[in-house]
Image: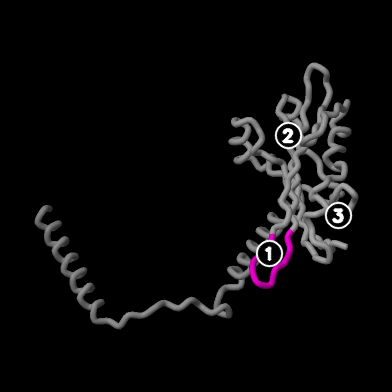
Amino acid sequence: MTACFTRCFKKLDHELTQSALISTHLPSFRPRMPAASTLPLWWLRRVVLAFFLLFCQTTLQAAEIDITQATLEATDDGYRLSASYSFELNRSLEDALVRGVPLYFTTDVQLTRRRWYWFDEVTVSVSRTVRISYNVLTRQYHAATTGQLQQSFSSLEDAMSLIRRPPRWVIADKNTLKPGDVYNVGLRMRLDVAQLPKPFQINALNNSDWRLSSDWKEFTFKVE
């Protein structure tokens, strides 16, 4: 048995050596990908379907918060942003809120000015956060905007109204923008998981229920 195994091993080693020697004398070549016309129809359908599903998933995730209205106007105090949003809290967020976990909704605003000789100039970049919480003892919801007093509400729907339809917000002083220039205004709202307690931050990063955000909404504003 051992002698037979040895002969077989030597024969196989000899054949591999001969194959290696032959391959060194063969011209190198690069395999070509088959043309689109030679690919099976079922394969092309799968590729198209995969791209379609990926596009639909991205679109659905981006539409969780809808910015229904956004305008910028000049006032005596400065440039005020007026915006409204449309969205609902899912069951996971409602349960976390009732159990004492506050939720933070942050609005980001950027004003940029085009420059032909360099990158666009970021003239204004500000954020504002609305904190919503629930008190188990009083059974009331509380909402507070950054730099303002806290307000109390008897229902979640009333508290959410402060987030969906926030008061106008001065995002820049009167001297910040140059008269006659046109600025591109970018606006978005998101559930700010970075402000959650540490244990919930880890859970939020791995849970799609906590990924609540809008797309960037852009419009132009000309300073008079």
Badge 2 density bin: few <14, some 14–19, many ≥20, Cα 10 Å: many
Q: Name the secondary structure under disc 1.
A: loop
Residue lying at 60% horizontally and 31% vertically, measured from the top left: 198
3D distance between C-alphas at marks 2 and 3: 27 Å
Q: Which mark is residue 103?
A: 2
Marks 1 and 2, the one that precedes in the sequence: 2
Based on the displayed image, in which of its 4 quarters is residue 49 positioned? bottom right
The answer to whether residue 115 is magenta is yes
Q: Which residue is mark 1?
A: 120
Total labels drawn: 3
Q: Over which residues does the magenta segment extend?
A: 112-121
Q: Are marks 1 and 3 in contact (CB under 8 Å)?
A: no
Q: Are marks 1 and 2 in contact (CB under 8 Å)?
A: no
Q: Does 147 appear above or below 187?
A: above
Marks 1 and 3, the one that precedes in the sequence: 3
Relative horizontal placement of residue 179, taking residue 195 as reference (left or right)? right
3D distance between C-alphas at marks 1 and 3: 20 Å
Q: Which residue is mark 3?
A: 72
Relative horizontal placement of residue 190, taking residue 220 as reference (left or right)? left
**Tag 2: residue type?**
Leu
**Tag 1: residue type?**
Asp
Expressed as whole percent of the image width and height from the top left, the position of residue 199 reads: 60, 30
